[in-house]
Image (tube, rainbow, N blue to C red):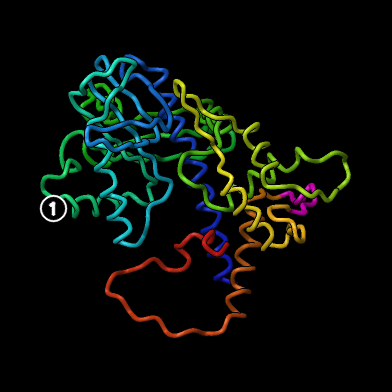
């Protein structure tokens, strides 16, 4: 019983972390578009070519000082617990610090380039420790110099009849070359986003570049996409192809535009995996002998609780039930590197 509760809570936590990270991504977008004198917003997930002739795609791209200096943001809703995987993630950040051109419509050689990594408060301590270790092992790394910074955030929940919900961004490591941003982020309390801005962001945006946890996408399908196929007030069973859901998703979550480029928010692969997860939980089924066709009752779920909570509870119970029915395999060999416990790993991997 206790294991099921822990898995359920971890599942809900991962949902909330991704949801908050989406708000953070577009809070930064909102900040840049509202303050062009500090930095000019260029695009979301814009492909850039660096001077090493490699293409990089940061989450958010900006520039300042007449396009002479670049400002990149990479936002992570979760980072690995495994040390080797975390080190690999840190090493990948190096590519964003190789100068990119162009920033504006006319190619110019950038004088410098800043990278801001924004990660969840739960990941901050081990991420900074890994960055320091990586810089010690690689003394010439740009991650140890000015121009690289790590930020995190807090979201203060509202109190009934009192304090409103608010979000704050604050620095935890390094600094950028942008003096105006440094003044704002380093002030007491960091950069504040009040409740009205936070509410707008949550209702306006749903996904970031990084793949969401499965329970997040399943919730989005149940809340937003699948009900649009309903043709009457009664519960119906529909045979729906994954491409139909994909096309409907693009209507609900249209592409972001960055000059002439487009970014599709929802990937077809994500939808297919979410349907597989719902099928394993017993909420829908596959149409026999028809690939990528799903038999889906609509409405799929009726519940007074938040859908993500109900899904996480069902997933935790199903996961533990599956474990009990499996035969014991060979005992695992011990390793010297500490690893996350089962409750600290996303339940999404079960699906």
**Vertical placement of residue 183 versus 123, above or below:** above
Count of residue discs: 1
- The residue under the point 42% across, 84% down is 331
Q: Using a 10 Å C-alpha cutoff, classify the residue at mark 1 as few (fewer than 14 neighbours), some (14 to 19) or many (20 or more).
A: few
Report the span colored magenta: 294-304
Q: Position of residue 250 (x, y in %)?
A: 62, 34
Q: Where is residue 151 in the image (x, y as percent from the top left)?
A: 32, 39
**Vertical placement of residue 207 versus 339, above or below:** above
The C terminus sits in image quarter: bottom right
Check if residue 245 falls in the magenta segment: no
Check if residue 300 falls in the magenta segment: yes
Please tell me in which quadrant of the rendered image residue 318 appears.
Answer: bottom right
**Is 63 left, or right, of 27 in this rendering?**
left
* Of the pair 239 and 120, the residue shown nearer to us: 239
- The residue under the point 76% across, 50% down is 300
The N terminus sits in image quarter: bottom right
* Of the pair 102 and 150, the residue shown nearer to us: 102
* Of the pair 31 and 288, the residue shown nearer to us: 288
Q: Position of residue 57 (x, y in %)?
A: 37, 36
**Is 257 left, or right, of 289 in this rendering?**
left
- The residue under the point 37% across, 57% down is 80
Look at mark 1 in the image and give the residue it sits on: 136
Please tell me in which quadrant of the rendered image residue 105 appears.
Answer: top left
Q: Position of residue 171 (x, y in %)?
A: 29, 37
> What secondary structure is marked by label 1?
helix
**Vertical placement of residue 193 versus 153, above or below:** above
């Amino acid at each position: 019983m206790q294991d099921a509760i822990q898995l359920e809570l971890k599942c809900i936590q991962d949902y909330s972390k991704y949801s908050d990270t989406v708000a953070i991504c577009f809070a930064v977008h909102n900040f840049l578009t509202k303050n062009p004198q500090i930095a000019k917003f260029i695009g979301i997930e814009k492909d850039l070519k660096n001077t090493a002739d490699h293409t990089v795609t940061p989450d958010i791209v900006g520039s300042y000082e007449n396009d002479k200096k670049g400002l990149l943001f990479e936002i992570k809703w979760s980072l690995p617990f495994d040390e080797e995987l975390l080190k690999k993630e840190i090493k990948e950040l190096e590519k964003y610090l190789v100068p990119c051109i162009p920033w504006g419509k006319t190619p110019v050689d950038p004088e410098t380039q800043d990278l801001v990594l924004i990660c969840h408060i739960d990941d901050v301590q081990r991420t900074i420790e890994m960055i320091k270790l990586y810089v010690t092992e690689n003394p010439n790394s740009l991650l140890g110099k000015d121009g690289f910074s790590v930020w995190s955030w807090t979201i203060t929940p509202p109190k009934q009849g009192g304090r409103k919900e608010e979000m704050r961004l604050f620095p935890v490591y390094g600094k950028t070359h942008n003096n105006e941003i440094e003044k704002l982020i380093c002030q007491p309390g960091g950069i504040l986003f009040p409740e009205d801005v936070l509410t707008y962001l949550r209702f306006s945006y749903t996904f970031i570049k990084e793949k969401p946890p499965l329970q997040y996408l399943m919730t989005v399908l149940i809340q937003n996409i699948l009900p649009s196929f309903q043709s009457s007030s009664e519960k119906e069973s529909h045979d729906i192809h994954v491409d139909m859901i994909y096309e409907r998703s693009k209507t609900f979550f249209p592409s972001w535009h960055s000059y002439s480029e487009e970014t599709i928010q929802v990937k077809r692969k994500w939808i297919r995996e979410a349907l597989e997860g719902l099928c394993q939980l017993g909420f829908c089924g596959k149409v026999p002998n028809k690939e990528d066709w799903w038999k889906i009752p609509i409405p799929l779920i009726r519940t007074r609780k938040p859908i993500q909570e109900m899904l996480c509870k069902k997933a935790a119970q199903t996961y533990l039930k599956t474990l009990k029915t499996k035969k014991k395999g060979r005992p695992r060999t011990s390793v010297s590197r500490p690893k996350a416990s089962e409750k600290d790993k996303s339940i999404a991997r079960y699906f």
